Amino acid sequence: MAIEAAERSVPAGDVPAAGNWSEARDRVGGVATAIARAVAVLGSDASIWAVAELTELELAEVLAGVDILVGYGLVADRNPLALAGPDTAAAVLDDIPFSARVRAHLDSGRILRDSGADAERIAAQLLQAGPTGLPWAASVYRAAAAGARRRGDGSAAERYLSQTLTERLSPGERAAVLRDTAEVRAIADPTEAIGDLLHELEWMQPSEVLSTVPVLRRILAASPKRDDVLWALDHATERVGERTPTAAAQLQLARGMVLATHANGVTWMESAASWLESRLSEWPQLGLHLAAIRCSLATLQGNDAVVARTNARTVLGQADPRSEFDACWHALMTSVFTEHPDDAEATCRRLQRELGGHEDEWKSLSLSLLRAEARRRAGDIKTTTASSGALLERLDRQHTDPMPSLRTCAAGLLAESLIQAGDTARAETVLREYGLFGAPADESESTFTLHVRGLLLAACGDVPAAVEAQLECGRHLANARTENPDLIRWRYAAVWGLMRLDRRDQAIDLAEENLELARRWRTPGAVGIAYQVLASTRPNRDRIEPLSQAIELLEVSGYQLDQAIAHYELGKAMRSTERDQAAHHHFLRALAIAEQVGAERLAERARAMTGPGSSTGRAKGLTAQEWKIAQLVAGGMSNPQIAAELFLARRTVEFHLSSVYRKLALSGRGDLAELLGGTPAVNGRHLISRPA
């Protein structure tokens, strides 16, 4: 053994005296010296049994020797054992010959490993010994690095990984360690981390290059220096393209996956598609990757959902999610926006099952976000709130952000679902907590945030600011050449606000544009919602037909919340034309769906419309002139327009309108419009009570 007792008995009759190690060493005896050296090697919290094994002493001898060391003030009087201070520990270690100290650290590492100790405690011993050549050292270092990363200590993780590279490794093991090292270094400098990997790509085997692609993708996803990292990825694509075309194709897909929401996302995906097309004749196996990137392009630009869905089904039927996750992700994103929400969610679950033990945290988080998006599209407020909240909690537990846009999207989903549920205070808290409320975010990440912020402003009664937020969201999407009206429904929310602000012409133009784009995209949900938007710009009597068409399409699409809103709006339109029985049916249907999905405020309004306090009953107290004016206000007309329509003075209109508000206990035009079938709800959002 490295530490051996010079004597097998403890000296008797020695009177303890204060002093340092050099003075006490000759007095404590050989056994106590061996124990002190063992404690110094093992470090603080040295267990008595580990000291006994390292010194090959009996437990009774160790205890007796410890008593002597405690008496001299060299060892603290506690268990686990520790030397009295860092100076004492350093002096004892310096007193051990170099070769004996190395053997002692190696033996300590073995003893700790055999006892099942934490990997970092074992690695700490091996680090003191230098390169060991032990067959198990590399696995200990990698486990220690993983532990350090989990607790957020990147420098310790990098130290362990650097030492791993000094041990005996196979080419595959070396490539894996280099990938781990790059991910750790990327926290401080992602461009340099990718550069380090690029130097190693030259000698990597094709299978190792493929394994490196997900690492490069994760570095890109987490990096704030996207332009520099993109340049490095392009360089990597060219470097590996000739030897490993599949890896180069996956790099193109990874770039498109991360940059789907970026201001230049469409442009970069078109570049990737061109790169794949130019090499397809030479490498036919790239066909599946090309189909995947075309899925995303069609989805972002809103070009023919039927073709996009067909491509997505082909990719998802042929690609292996364990080795071709990026291709699967592009296809799955398309499925979320083209398939029935239940079918899209089922596909997400299938991919998670197929990944099994190969599912790393980044892939898991990405699939969880897509599942939450599927439930959002279904209008399932309860499930969307729960799943997006759980996803945020998982992201918050990460010591490094695996993908900033994941957190942004998850926070946006949670805030939107809270707005729909009527909890505007909590929605605002979420946006503020994640830095998404107030100053505009970076354009590449802020588009969905602007939309959700606009919804919150509308719910809180600030209609002008809400409209501006939605129009700004639309400008961002136009600059990004993202024209699909069903990705972010900013036009729906903008039209609602424009009608409230009496900007009817602008609202009509936007609604007609929305319908044209929805017909180009060709999904029932998008077209159904477009009919809802169009109906909101028309007088009450002209809303019945487009709302009826919307309901028919939305039932096919599986968009439950949108169905409930369409039924509610159709009920209001029918009641305004005195078709009370038909209106009652639609209010009941809206109530049933709203209660099912958790749209509490919408359910409350629908319930009021079906009871004795419904609008027809409440309106009976109005005079004929008041009723007529109330109907015109509900239809969106301004006071001057009503005065011209009824040949009245403007002051007369204002007098009657004040009487209407008083008799119906309403606060203004918006409440009157809601009650009598005027300005429609926007995904249930203006059916939310304003905070006091």
Image (cartoon, grey):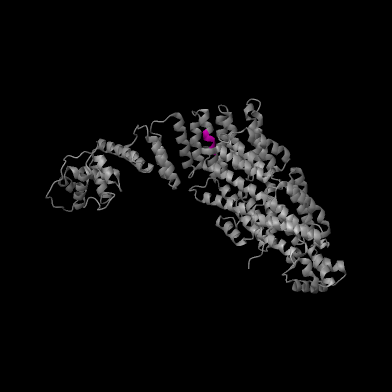
Q: Quadrant of the N terminus?
A: top left
Q: Residue at x 24, y 53 (%)?
A: 77
- From this view, report whether residue 680 is shown above or below residue 137: below
Q: Residue at x 66, y 43 (%)?
A: 343
Q: Is residue 377 left or right of residue 634?
A: left
Does 109 appear in magenta?
no
- Front-most of 86 and 291? 291
Q: Quadrant of the C terminus?
A: bottom right
Q: Place residue 492 in its image quadrant.
A: bottom right
**Going by the picture, which residue comes out furthest to the left?**
13
Q: Position of residue 171 (x, y in %)?
A: 45, 29
- Front-most of 583 and 491? 583
Whether residue 50 is visible here, answered yes or no, is: yes
Residue range (magenta): 211-216
**Going by the picture, which residue comes out furthest to the right?**
647
Q: Position of residue 471 (x, y in %)?
A: 70, 54
Type of secondary structure dominating the magenta stretch = helix
Q: Position of residue 511 (x, y in %)?
A: 77, 52
Whether residue 268 is visible here, answered yes or no, is: no
Q: Is residue 659 left or right of residue 34?
A: right
Q: Place residue 96 in its image quadrant.
A: top left
- Front-most of 611 and 113? 611
Q: Position of residue 280 (x, y in %)?
A: 65, 28
Tag count:
0
